[in-house]
Image (cartoon, rainbow, N blue to C red):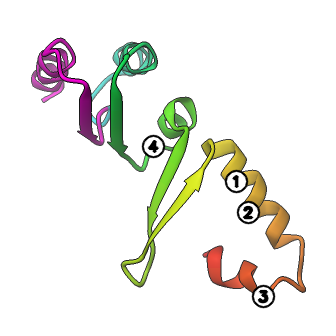
Amino acid sequence: MGEKCRVAFLKLYFSGANLLVLDEPANYFDVETKEKVEQALQGFTGAFVVVSHDRYLIGKLATRLLFLGQDSVLFLYEGSWQEYEEEQNRKLQEPDNPEAADEVR
């Protein structure tokens, strides 16, 4: 499966597209290939949307985060994964903040 995914990624990357939509792009890759995918996406001149549960990959690539909440409501966060985590941790430290209980789950 990993080799097929590598070939598919390379075809897509070099297709000339200016928008890539990737669903779990590094799932079937070894560490070396994951690093190459990260580097390729960091150097990509177009835009890309990545759907992933890989927090490391998201941390390396994301500049905006889009979350699908429990109520099927989308939430956009303008910033990196690290900034989002820091903000959520600050909110957790504020027991008087009623929004913290709603947003952080």
Residue assigned mark 1? 85
C-alpha distance separating marks 3 and 2? 13 Å
**Image position of 27 with respect to 11: above or below:** below
Say if the magenta span includes residue 24: yes
- Disc 4 from disc 1: Cα separation: 14 Å
The three-letter amino acid code for the residue at tag 4 is Asp
The amino acid on which the numbered mark 2 sits, given as a three-letter code, is Gln
The residue drawn where x is 89% and y is 70% is 93
User: Image check: 15 left or right of 31?
Assistant: left
The label number, if any, that marks residue 8 in the structure image? none
- Earlier in the chain: of badge 4 and badge 1, it is 4
- Whole-Å distance between the Cαs marked 2 and 1? 5 Å
Q: Nearer the viewer, residue 104 or 28?
A: 104
Question: Vertically, is 13 above or below 87?
Answer: above
Mark 2, secondary structure of its residue: helix
State how far apart marks 4 and 3 are (Cα).
Answer: 29 Å
Q: Which mark is residue 54?
A: 4
Image-based side of 91 in relation to 78, left or right: right
